[in-house]
Image (tube, rainbow, N blue to C red):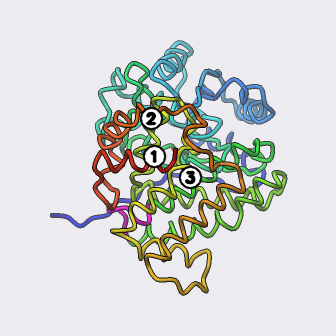
């Protein structure tokens, strides 16, 4: 049996203030003639979208626009975007936004080179052909969907989030220009930042992690703890914004190859059933899952505490509890420590949420194999 570890990244990643100006050159390198801009209605009307159109036009690349991306993209929106892609003779995608836009864009690119319907590819490496060319332009520092080899689409018929994974889904170019994030609302900065932190923490204790992803997760935790509060409370702090782009990117490098765990498995169900923001759900659940998991990996959590408090002398179990406390304090300060009951979650749905969470692929790499009643206990603690 092979002990190989796999690591996935896009071919090119652009960083730094003003790097958006390079997208025309990247489009030329990819050999595309007409791109479909996949984004939401708000972002379609922003200066960022206007600049994308300008830079592509100056490079001789045409642009069509799909602005129907939802906060949790659905099969319907993917199919609508793909119809527009085909109708207008596009040969690639440029996504603008956070994880929702990028995931929708990835799905369109997979359908451009693999037969429909999309649902047949739920799982790992089930799409045979490399996706159409894609440039992902990030406006949030959170999901890291611009660099990971997976995407998540909601099936509204079953209120289930479908997870698609495979090297053929990787984008070609990832763009992290912090100037595009300066006007991001505080609540979105907070939720997406906590999403990135969850990626790093969960990856560090994942049963699928390995040395490289562990080292990256540690670095990501440091970046995020040092910069997230500044980015939320001083939204025009370009240095904090840029550091958060590195934090979320590094966390994406970690979990994109090392996996996540039960926080994501449960958050996916909350998003699917209630259409709640993914990053916010992660923020709410993370401390409670740490306390649940510590029976198997207290020392790992204590290691992460030392990343943010190098002088700590706490034992493994006390260190794990302290990490959960520090994350709760951070979440409280930036406004993401919200009880599930205030988001409209119903206790009567807990058994269904628990059942679906255990069916979610992310639960398979959690350090503790949970029982349905234990997941219900986590939901109760977060309620």
Residue range highlighted in magenta: 203-210
Q: CA distance from mark 3 to mark 1?
A: 43 Å
Q: Residue 228, which numbered label? A: none
Crowd around label 1: few <14 · some 14–19 · many ≥20 (10 Å): some
State which mark lies toward you, 3 or 2.
2
The spot of residue 369 in percent (x, y) is 28, 55
State which mark lies toward you, 3 or 1.
1
Q: Which residue does the numbered mark 2 point to in the structure image?
A: 347
Q: Which image quarter is the N terminus in?
A: bottom left
First in sequence: mark 3 vs mark 1: 3
Q: Which residue does the numbered mark 1 point to in the structure image?
A: 380
Q: Is residue 380 magenta?
A: no
Report the residue that reaches farthest toward the left: 1
Instruction: Give the camera-side residue of 229 and 66.
Output: 229
Q: CA distance from mark 3 to mark 2?
A: 45 Å
User: Which residue occupies 52% across, 30% down?
Assistant: 104
Q: Which residue does the numbered mark 3 point to in the structure image?
A: 12
Would you say the residues marked 1 and 2 are in contact, meaning their CB atoms lie under 8 Å apart?
yes
Magenta: predominant secondary structure element?
Answer: loop
> Residue 227 occupies which quadrant of the picture?
bottom right
Q: Is residue 209 magenta?
A: yes
């Amino acid at each position: 049996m092979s002990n190989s570890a796999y690591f996935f990244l896009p071919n090119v990643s652009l960083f730094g203030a003003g790097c958006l100006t390079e997208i025309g050159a990247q489009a030329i390198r990819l050999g595309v003639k007409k791109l479909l801009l996949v984004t939401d209605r708000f972002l379609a009307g922003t200066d960022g979208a206007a600049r994308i159109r300008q830079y592509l036009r100056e490079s001789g690349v045409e642009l069509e626009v799909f602005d129907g991306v939802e906060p949790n993209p659905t099969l319907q929106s993917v199919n609508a975007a793909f119809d527009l892609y085909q109708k207008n003779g596009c040969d690639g995608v440029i996504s603008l936004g956070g994880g929702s836009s990028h995931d929708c864009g990835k799905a369109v690119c997979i359908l451009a080179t693999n037969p429909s319907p999309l649902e047949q590819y739920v799982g790992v490496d089930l799409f045979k052909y490399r996706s159409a060319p894609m440039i992902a332009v990030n406006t949030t520092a959170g999901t890291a969907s611009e660099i990971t080899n997976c995407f998540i689409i909601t099936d509204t018929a079953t209120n289930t989030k479908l997870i698609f994974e495979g090297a053929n889904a990787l984008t070609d170019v990832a763009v992290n220009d912090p100037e595009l994030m300066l006007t991001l609302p505080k609540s979105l900065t907070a939720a997406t930042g906590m999403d990135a932190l969850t990626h790093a923490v969960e990856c560090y204790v994942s049963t699928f992690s390995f040395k490289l992803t562990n080292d990256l997760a540690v670095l990501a935790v440091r970046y995020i703890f040092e910069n997230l509060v500044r980015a939320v409370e001083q939204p025009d702090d370009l240095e904090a914004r840029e550091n958060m782009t590195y934090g979320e990117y590094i966390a994406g490098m970690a979990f994109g190859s090392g996996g996540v765990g039960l926080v994501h498995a449960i958050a996916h169900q909350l998003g699917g059933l209630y259409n709640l923001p993914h990053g916010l759900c992660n923020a709410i659940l993370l401390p409670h899952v740490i306390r649940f998991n510590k029976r198997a990996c207290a020392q790992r959590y204590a290691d992460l505490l030392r990343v943010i408090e190098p002088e700590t002398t706490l034992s493994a179990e006390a260190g794990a509890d302290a990490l959960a406390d520090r994350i709760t304090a951070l979440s409280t300060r930036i406004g993401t420590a919200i009880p599930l009951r205030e988001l409209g979650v119903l206790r009567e749905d807990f058994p269904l949420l628990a059942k679906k969470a255990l069916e979610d692929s992310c639960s398979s790499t959690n350090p503790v194999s949970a029982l349905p009643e234990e997941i219900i206990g986590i939901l109760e603690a977060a309620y």
